[in-house]
Image (cartoon, rainbow, N blue to C red):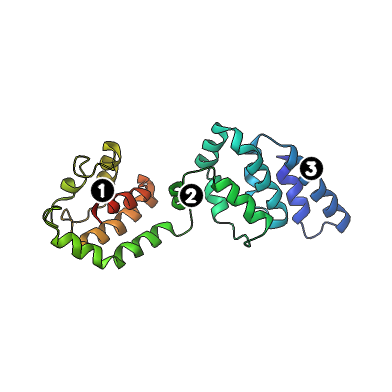
Amino acid sequence: DVLRRLLAVYLHQDSSEDLRTKAKRALKSVIQKCTHLPALEPLLEAPPNILKYVVQQFAKVLPSDLNARKSFVQSGGLQKIQEVKAEVGSKLHDYIEEINMLYPPEIVQYYSPNYAETLLKKMEESQGAWECLGTSTHLGDPVQPLSWWLVPERNPQLHTSECDGLLAAVQNSNCSSCFTESSWCGAIRSATHVSSTGHKLEFRLLHRVLACWT
């Protein structure tokens, strides 16, 4: 826990300027030599002038370590750096972009702030898409049960496990079983709540489901 103690000394209001300078120098030196990334993750909440060294080290180590990239997602590290408000053109912003490029775009988007709300807004604004859905003969009746829509044979872009997972999450939200514009929006709102309480609904799937129908 040395890194957090050094950070605490650096941030303490009673620390002298000399002590702060030495603490920062020590932090920078240790961070730049640390390859055990879990030890650096507590510093992802450090001030920008320290955070840039932390993110730089992640950007340096992650490309060559698959397990570390997986762990970075599972531990919440990827989500934390999406929440960092780095100025465009700054080194911190560049390091974050380097890390993001190591992951599929939909994963990065999923962990971006307000992703669920943004997706819901897009769905509600897609009036034209819903009109097409209601008049298109090859898509069938727009008030089919959800189980009718979430079948891999009808939506080949989805895997069976994804269909099952999304259907289960929406059904658990106690929303209407009829797939109309209003019930879809209600399903997303309910499923958003379900996700926040531990059902782990992956909103990136909603993009792919919608893509099958538009």
Question: Disc 3, disc 2: CB below 8 Å?
Answer: no
Residue drawn at point x = 12 percent, y = 53 percent: 140
Q: CA distance from mark 1 to mark 3?
A: 50 Å
Q: Which residue is mark 3?
A: 29
Q: Disc count in the image? A: 3
Residue 143 image offset from top left, x and y in percent: 13, 57
The vertical placement of 134 against 105, above or below, is below
Name the spot of residue 114 as percent of width and height, x first: 45, 60
Taking 2 as reference, is 95 left or right?
A: left
Upstream in sequence: badge 1 or badge 3: 3
Q: Position of residue 106 (x, y in %)?
A: 43, 48
Helix, strand or loop at label 2? It is: helix
Q: Residues within 10 Å of mark 2 (few under 14, many from 20)?
A: some
Q: Position of residue 128 (x, y in %)?
A: 24, 67
Q: Is 102 placed left or right of 131 in the picture?
A: right
Can you tell which of label 3 and label 2 is closer to the viewer?
2
- Residue 141 in the figure: left or right of residue 81: left
Q: Amino acid at mark 1?
A: Asn
How many neighbours does mark 1 have within 10 angstroms: few (below 14), some (14-19), or many (20 or more)?
Answer: some
Of 114 and 92, nearer the camera is 92
- Check residue 172 in the rendering and tell me which mark sits there, or answer none: 1
Q: Nearer the viewer, mark 1 or mark 3?
A: 3
Q: Which quadrant is home to the N terminus?
A: top right
Q: Residue at x 23, y 44 (%)?
A: 155
For marks 1 and 2, the one nearer the N-term is 2
Q: Earlier in the sequence, mark 3 or mark 2?
A: 3
Label 3: state its secondary structure: helix
Q: Is residue 32 left or right of residue 165?
A: right
Question: What amino acid is found at the position of numbered circle 2 in the picture?
Answer: Val
Of helix, strand and loop, which one carries label 1? Answer: helix
Mark 1 to mark 2: distance in Å?
Answer: 26 Å
Residue under label 2, please give it. Answer: 108
